[in-house]
Image: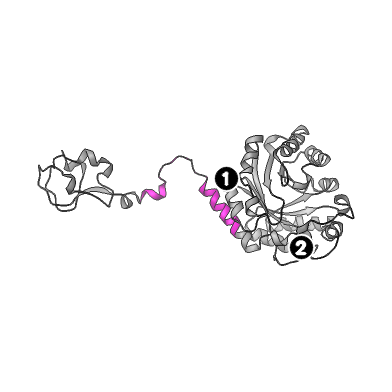
Amino acid sequence: MNKVRIIAEAGVNHNGDIEKAYQLIDAAKEAGADYVKFQTFKAENLVTKDATKAKYQIENTKNNDSQFQMLKQLEINEEDHLNLINYCETQGIKFLSTAFDLDSINFLKDKIDFYKIPSGEITNYPYLVKVAKLGLPIVMSTGMADINEVKAAYHVLVDNGINPKEITILHCNTEYPTPMEDVNLKAMLHIQREIGVAVGYSDHTLGIEVPIAAVALGASVIEKHFTLDRNLPGPDHKASLEPHELKAMVSAIRNIEKAIAGSGVKAPSKSELKNKAIARKSIHLIKPCKKGNLIEEDNMIALRPGDGITPMEWESIKGKKLKVDTLAYHKLKKSDVL
């Protein structure tokens, strides 16, 4: 069974407070996630100083700061990155971060297991080339993209040295939170059919049911934002899980993994075989009969337990002679009939 990689996306939900970042690591570990993921960027390399915020960012931050000002307050410096990495090691959870600029790609190259390309960089050609040439496996989100844009980004990665087997593409919707009617979860399977790579799902809906459904459909990676408290100020808290919800999601995904890991062949499982005779029925005779009597249909009934002659042999048993005397509600055996 291939284990689904679960990425608990702390993102910028530390609000620029490194102590909250440590608490987010603790919460991700407690929930059972495989990775806790932050965001690595220099605001100067990411956005112009007069760029406006998205509508959801304005609503969730409740101020008129520019996107640059907002992001500047959410940066994690290099020293804090190293401290967070060390803390993850002591806690037994893997550190991950998304780079949002070329310098950050370089900084992370020897600190992570794979590069996580965010949706906003899927059309950033120099970014894609840079990531590909560093040679780590890649997980790429596809929010806001159509299938042709996804294919184009994929080909940039492959053309610059990445083995297709080391690419996982995540279906995603870049709205926070994503309305259920916009999830279009089957698009994940469209990506898989069209490109032939491993797929997964990065979720921005409220609740935990959609990522669980994605695993049932074959997602190999799940990414989900989480926060210490959804009521905290900041751009992403409102569309994030709280720790107890993250834990419930991880638990449900692990159960789904087990549920879909079978052979795919319809056959009774070991655990249910003991109930077969109890739940099924056998042919019984309602009234007492004498040896030599014919078995008449109006004297036949299907009753539990099911360790006698199956009612599926009803027509072949009807009309046969009895070899023994029987009492009322006798359970027929093959040795009772001629």
User: Quick check: 122 left or right of 199?
Assistant: right
Q: Which mark is residue 217?
A: 1
Residue 322 within the segment the image draws in magenta: no
- Which structural element holds mark 2? helix
Residue bearing the label numbered 2: 59
- The quarter of the picture where the C terminus appears is top left
Q: How many marks?
A: 2
- Which structural element holds mark 1? helix
Looking at marks 1 and 2 on the same chain, the residue that comes earlier in the sequence is marked by 2
- The quarter of the picture where the N terminus appears is top right
Q: Amino acid at mark 1?
A: Leu
The picture quadrant where one finds residue 155 is top right
Instruction: State whether residue 244 is above or below residue 100.
Output: below
Residue 272 within the segment the image draws in magenta: yes
- Give the residue displayed 76% in from the left and 50% down from the top: 98
x, y percent for residue 121:
78, 45
Magenta part of the chain: 248-274
x, y percent for residue 31:
63, 59
Q: Amino acid at mark 2?
A: Glu
Question: Which of label 1 and label 2 is nearer to you?
Answer: 2
The picture quadrant where one finds residue 10 is bottom right
Instruction: State whether residue 159 is above or below residue 215.
Output: above
Q: Nearer the viewer, residue 62 or 198?
A: 62
Question: Coloring scheme of the render?
Answer: one colour
* Residue 310 visible to the viewer: no
